[in-house]
Image: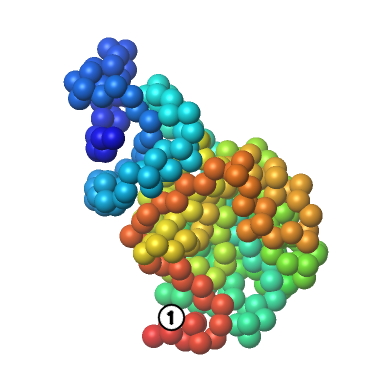
Amino acid sequence: MLIGITNIKQQIITEHKQRVSEVFFEKNNFTKLVYYEIIEDLALAMQRKKEIENWRLEKKKKLVEALNPMWSDLSESLFCEIFQATNKIKISGLVISAGLSSRMGSFKPLLHYKNKSFMMNILSKLDSVCDEIIVVTGHNRELIETELRTFSTINRIKTVVNKNYKEGMLSSLQSGLRKLLDSNWVLYHFIDQPTLPIIFYKDFITQIDNRFDWIQPKYNGRNGHPILIHKRVVEKIIEASAKSNLKELTQSSNIKKKYWHCNYPEIHDDVDTIERYNNLSK
């Protein structure tokens, strides 16, 4: 089992008519491509390569079979995916801001980080990668709507009021997703993560891969947020009982998950108590 890295993406795009795919595989003496990941950052690609190389053969086989149980040749799939990635897809941001902020003791969306509210910090970054943004409101919705009027591209933001916000976060998520049924991907964001740098979002969307339904960042072996959700899963979440929770809903083996091993520790930030906020402000 050979593991390697190639930067042939641009070459494939420009020279596909000359069957670069065939040339590439013949040149490297490959017989079959059974697994691949597209990682735009070379350093991260090298890190991922070394990680997999150190695995035992059995673990490598499980990685392949999770995506490709029949060990089929995926070379054509790879090249199709590269071309599909050049086509326009619709990415929508979804920010949940309906709760009571009871653990914080203050209304989280309007707390400040780097001279801007949590809400404005998040929206200004999502605005750089999303075609539209939905903000789900509930508690103190008038205050949020007033804050949103100051946003420079307010026309790209819509609010949805979840009157049942006290039922839990899933009800707010469902309320927002109902407005995004025409989106290819939804970038689902919590209001208590204002610390992520803008480059994170630009890197994150390069991980979009239509073979998967769910893309989640991972740092130092632990999963984080936000999450990219494919429209196939959006429909399942909307149809679920409000008494369910998102973790249960997405445990199904029918939902293919991709974990992006990134270099952003901020994906673990969760500013939901006054102690954490005070530490953030130092």
Q: Position of residue 113 (x, y in %)?
A: 46, 75
Residue 85 in which image quadrant: top left
The amino acid at mark 1 is Leu
User: Where's residue 84, x and y in %?
Assistant: 45, 28
Q: Is residue 153 above or below residue 230?
A: below
Q: Foreground: 209 or 119? A: 209
Specify whether residue 116 is in view.
no
Relative to 2, is 45 above or below? below
In the rendered image, the quadrant that contains the C terminus is bottom left
Look at mark 1 in the image and give the residue it sits on: 280
Q: Position of residue 236 (x, y in %)?
A: 70, 45
Quadrant of residue 141 in the image? bottom right
- In the displayed structure, 205 sits above or below 85; it is below
Image quadrant occupied by the N terminus: top left
The outermost residue toward the left is 27
Question: Residue 21: in sight, yes or no?
Answer: yes
Residue for point 21% across, 22% down: 29
Residue appearing at x 26%, y 38% in the figure: 3
Q: How is the image coloured?
A: rainbow
Q: Is residue 176 left or right of residue 261?
A: right
Outermost top residue? 18
- Residue 54 drawn at (x, y percent): 27, 51
Question: Residue at 69% across / 64% down in the picture?
Answer: 169
Q: How many marks?
A: 1
Front residue of 124/215: it is 215
Query: Label 1 neighbourhood size at 10 Å, few (<14), some (14-19), many (20+)?
Result: few
Say left or right for 177 vs 46.
Answer: right
Q: Secondary structure at mark 1?
A: helix
